[in-house]
Image: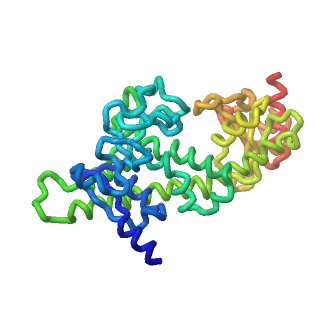
Amino acid sequence: LLATRAHDIMTSIGTHSGAFQADEALGVWLLRRLPQYKSASLTRSRDPDVLKPLTIVIDVAGLYDHDQLRYDHHQRGFFETFDGENKAARDGGRPDVTGPDSATGVFKTKLSASGLVYKHYGREILCALHPTLRSSPDALEWVYTKMYRDFMEGLDANDNGIEIADQVRYKDGTSLPMRVARLNSRWNEPAGSGPTETERFEQASALCGSEFGAALEYIVECELPARSLVEEALQARHSVHPCGEVLCLSSGGCPWKTHLYELERSLGVEPLVKFVLYPDTAGMWRVQAVTVEGTAFTNRLGLLEPWRGVRDAELAAKCGIPGAKFVHASGFIGGHETNEGALQMALKTIESSR
């Protein structure tokens, strides 16, 4: 116990002083989730002599070297990505990687300091926050990548000055980086009034941690169970119908689209699923077309055109399926009183497309 306390006293985290951003505020919060830095002191400085003896330093000092526990991203030549090879990463960055075009891996966004922390310690941090992930390596790896894609990558891009699009139609003032920026002291604020710079930084770090925790909780407690449900349904699709092109989910509201695309690829599903059946909150069975991946409104196969925009008795007469309730005007979704009826709506559409 005494040895542990001595270690905590000697362990220190460093980052730069002055105006702060979401990047280092989150990076510090992430490090504090690790047992070795849970009680570490925080030093904010730009003085190399002050930073040199510190245990771990992020977002300052002009050096990225995992062995030395230095994680800056501002130095000339640095271009590290989330899933890129890391063998040549040292002071000056990767000489073989100069930008997105030469970056290895799926992700092409240059990492910020918090991105570097997440790359090297992310799995351990996720397990500290959600210990059940330790018992499922596959789930942990999926959450690790999902959390980067959904949360961390945007912060990396923002801190490195990468626009979300070549042309933007409006400015978003509600983002996490903007909210953190507003926590800095104002230019015309009287000296000595309000919280100190360190107190403001701690507020920003807590805000970033709260956002990170909420995003992670949603992925672990909502998205991950949904993925399991979709995988089970995908494996059982031939029991719904031998064609294998209709998926049946027992629970409505389950977020299934992204999981379906990923699982179809990983399992080598062919032919692709065309329709998903599920009950809504009122007990009606929905039959929803699967969109082409990467599109919002282009269906792999829409419900038959003569049914679109028609409801109740008129629809039942047109499709020849008693109990049919409606088909949306675009053909992306319809409804039936029963699971069997919804399945027949999907199968008639598939058969007509042969």
- The image shows residue 293 at horizontal and vertical percentages of 63, 31
> Would residue 48 appear left or right of 217 to someone viewing this image?
left
On the image, the x and y values in percent for residue 252 come to: 70, 52
Q: What residue lies at 87% left-to-right and 38% top-to-bottom?
A: 241
Q: Along the horizontal axis of the image, is 168 left or right of 222? A: left
Taking depth in this image into account, of 56 and 293 the one nearest to the observer is 56
Residue drawn where x is 45% and y is 26% of the image = 96
Residue 81's place in the image compared with 229, above or below, is: above
Residue 165 picture location, percent across and down: 41, 30
Q: Closest to the observer: 310 or 196?
A: 196
The residue at 79%/29% (across/down) is 271
Q: Is residue 19 left or right of residue 268?
A: left
Res. 238 image quadrant: top right
Q: Is residue 119 visible?
A: yes
Is residue 253 visible to us here?
A: no
Q: Is residue 2 above or below residue 264?
A: below
Q: To which quarter of the image does residue 313 belong?
A: top right
Foreground residue among 99 and 190: 99
